[in-house]
Amino acid sequence: MTTEPGATLDHLRCTFPAQPRYLPLVRGMVSEAAGLAGYDQDLTTRILLAVTEAVTNVIRHAYNHAVDKPIDLELRVDGDCLRLDLIDYGRFIDPKHIASRPLDQVRPGGLGVHLIKTTMDHVEYRENAHGGTTLTMVKQGS
């Protein structure tokens, strides 16, 4: 995991390999950022779940489980607003094709997008300069 030189606590950027074993480090950074924004433990836990789902989706769908690819995470704290940008270098996933399964279907998987969208106040998927997807997630206030 690397951190950009000169990064401050209100804007931090890191790059980590697309491997699940790095999720605890990512979760630690996001947890600290949520603390800086003044979020309580319940909200922080929900944000951590959303970020975990987002990273897992990158590993599974953008990288097809390839472990040699990077994922960038940018964290910004502005007062009680937390912004997270998750940047992959895989293939762009058109937001029209990103959907949760119906909630009445009882089976594992397929609820990550629903969790992300119900936790965060703003969720946006867009193609980035690398041809991959940038997922922006914003939480306003606690």
Image (cartoon, rainbow, N blue to C red):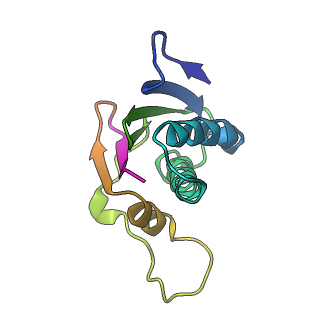
Given residues 87 and 11, the one toward you in this image is: 11
Q: Position of residue 61 (x, y in %)?
A: 49, 53
Given residues 134 and 26, the one toward you in this image is: 26
The image shows a total of numbered marks equal to 0
Given residues 36 and 101, the one toward you in this image is: 36
- Vertical placement of 76 versus 96: above or below? above
Q: Name which residue lies at 31% across and 50% down.
A: 125
Q: Name which residue lies at 33% across and 54% down.
A: 123
Q: Residue furthest right?
A: 21
- Vertical placement of 120 versus 127: above or below? below
Q: Position of residue 71 (x, y in %)?
A: 51, 34
- Vertical placement of 124 versus 18: above or below? below
Q: Position of residue 25 (x, y in %)?
A: 66, 35
Quarter holding the N terminus?
Answer: top right
Q: Name which residue lies at 51% across and 70% down.
A: 111
**Residue extent of the magenta highlight:** 131-142
Q: Name which residue lies at 33% across and 64% down.
A: 97
Quarter holding the C terminus?
Answer: bottom left
Q: Residue furthest bottom?
A: 104
Magenta stretch holds residue 120: no
Q: Position of residue 37 (x, y in %)?
A: 45, 40
Q: What secondary structure do most residues of the magenta stretch adopt?
A: strand
Magenta stretch holds residue 136: yes
- Left or right of 15? Residue 138 is left
- Left or right of 60? Residue 138 is left
